[in-house]
Amino acid sequence: MLISDMVVLDLDWQGQKLTIIKETDQLLRRFGQMDMIKLNPKGRVEVFRSVADEIWAPMLGRAAFQLEDQREESPSKGEIVQLEITADDPKAILVPFGVNCTISSAEGATLLRIGTHEEYTHPGDRFQIS
């Protein structure tokens, strides 16, 4: 089961080009900042956005995602989803606001993060890389 409003996008290499978000996905109007996050071996990033969605996609390596829906009015409140994504089988995950997300990598990974604005813009935002 997926968390309500969570989206997993199948990505497809077209020669040497990997499109992360297509116009037809109708997501670009909501995003304005893009970051590359490098996780060292056994590294992790913990993210919670109180107001804004984010999109995450591994560019190098393998990453394990754990998402927990903490939104009071969500039909999937309390649901926990765990999935692993590799750069070799590219996918992107839209993490809705109000969903706690922990990303870890045993071997290390480089991740693309797309958001509407910088972390800590809204009260309750959390962003920690370790």
Image: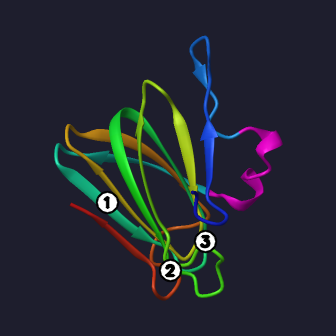
Q: Position of residue 120 (x, y in %)?
A: 45, 78
Quadrant of the frame with the C terminus? bottom left
State the residue at coordinates (63%, 41%). Answer: 9
Q: Is residue 89 left or right of residue 96?
A: left
Residues shaded magenta? 22-32
Task: Please say whether residue 26 is one of the residues in the magenta stretch.
Answer: yes
Disc 3: which residue: 52
Q: Secondary structure at mark 2?
A: loop
Q: Residues within 10 Å of mark 2 (few under 14, many from 20)?
A: some
User: Which quarter of the picture shows residue 95?
Assistant: bottom right
Q: Amino acid at mark 2?
A: Gln
Which disc number belongs to residue 75? none
In this rendering, the answer to whether 102 lies above or below 35 is: below
Disc 2: which residue: 70
Between disc 1 and disc 2, the foreground one is 2
User: Which quarter of the picture shows residue 67?
Assistant: bottom left
Task: Please say whether residue 12 is one of the residues in the magenta stretch.
Answer: no
State the residue at coordinates (53%, 83%). Answer: 122
Q: Position of residue 43 (x, y in %)?
A: 21, 52
State the residue at coordinates (49%, 88%). Answer: 123
Q: Secondary structure at mark 3?
A: loop
Q: Secondary structure at mark 1?
A: strand
Q: Position of residue 117 (x, y in %)?
A: 57, 67
CB atoms at circles 3 and 1 under 8 Å apart?
no
Disc 1: which residue: 45
In this rendering, the answer to whether 88 lies above or below 4 is: above
Q: Residues within 10 Å of mark 3 (few under 14, many from 20)?
A: some
Q: Is residue 29 left or right of residue 51?
A: right
